[in-house]
Image (cartoon, rainbow, N blue to C red):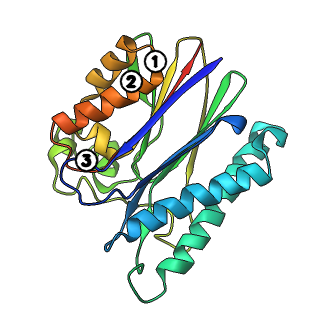
Amino acid sequence: MISVGFKTDRGMLRRSNEDSVFVVPKHQLYIVADGVGGHNSGEVASRMAVETIADYAMSNPPEDVKGDKALKAYFEECMVLANSRIYTEAQKPGRRYGMATTCVLLYIREDTAFVVNIGDSRCYLVRDGIMRQISQDHSVVMELVRSGVLSEEDAKTSPDRNQITRALGGEETAQPDFFSFRLYPADTVVLCSDGLYSEVEEDRIAQLCSRYKTMHRLTKQLVDEANKNGGKDNISVVCVRIS
């Protein structure tokens, strides 16, 4: 049994919401994308990403794909297709020039979660009150953290913390990461844009995941908390709990 909640909000300072969220319960597929680009073109890029992936999944159900290796290739193909469509549009002169988007995707098959990400939207697993990040940020500061040049604490306040190194539409080719892990009863998987984790500490997110039993209440509370703490960016959250 799986329960799901999702919410997206423009935050307290932004004039528009360039995040997109897509939930396809029939195929146990969940997506968060955070668009980048001026003149609201980020909104176009994030919407193109989730619509392309969702259309692909509904036309070619992931549950028909046999084996983890084939499933990885399947989702890489989804991302490549989305990247190609966004990149082509982003090369045209005009308001959409240079647009791109992050994307984090969760697919659940029986007791296994599969995660695909590009950019700095994240996937977390909360288990027994402890939260760990599954995805890896494709950003300037996190690459410095992984190389030992910068501490995680310094990364939180770095002026370069919003600079991503990979995105759908940013380059002619896409390089997503792929992760998988086993799920257990009471696990909560959180997908989110940086508007959440930039405003709400990870320990607090884990605490709220343990407190709220209903996923719709949980997602609302997470968004409310981010807004209370400043809401400087768009905020999108998908919470999936295994029971």
Which quarter of the figure is the N terminus placed in? top right
Residue drawn at 65 percent across, 35 percent down: 25
Query: Residue 160's x, y, as percent?
Result: 21, 57
Secondary element at image label 2: helix
Of the residues shown, which amino acid type is indicated by label 2? Answer: Leu
Q: Can residue 76 be seen in this view?
A: no
Residue 181 lies in what quarter of the image? top right
Label for residue 227? none
Q: How many labels does the image show?
A: 3
How far across and down, in percent of the image, does residue 198 sit? 25, 41
Q: Who is closer to the viewer here, 203 or 92?
A: 92
Label 1 SS: loop
Cα separation, mark 1 vs mark 2, equals: 6 Å
Can you see residue 162?
yes
C-beta proximity under 8 Å, tags 1 and 2: yes
- Residue tagged 1: 214
Residue under the point 37% across and 59% down: 18
Label for residue 11?
Answer: 3
* Residue drawn at the location 20% of the way across and 42% of the way down: 156
Which comes sooner in the sequence, label 3 or label 1? 3
**Whole-percent x and y of residue 136?**
44, 43
The residue that mark 2 highlights is 218
Alpha-carbon neighbours of circle 1 within 10 Å: few (<14), some, or many (≥20)? Answer: some
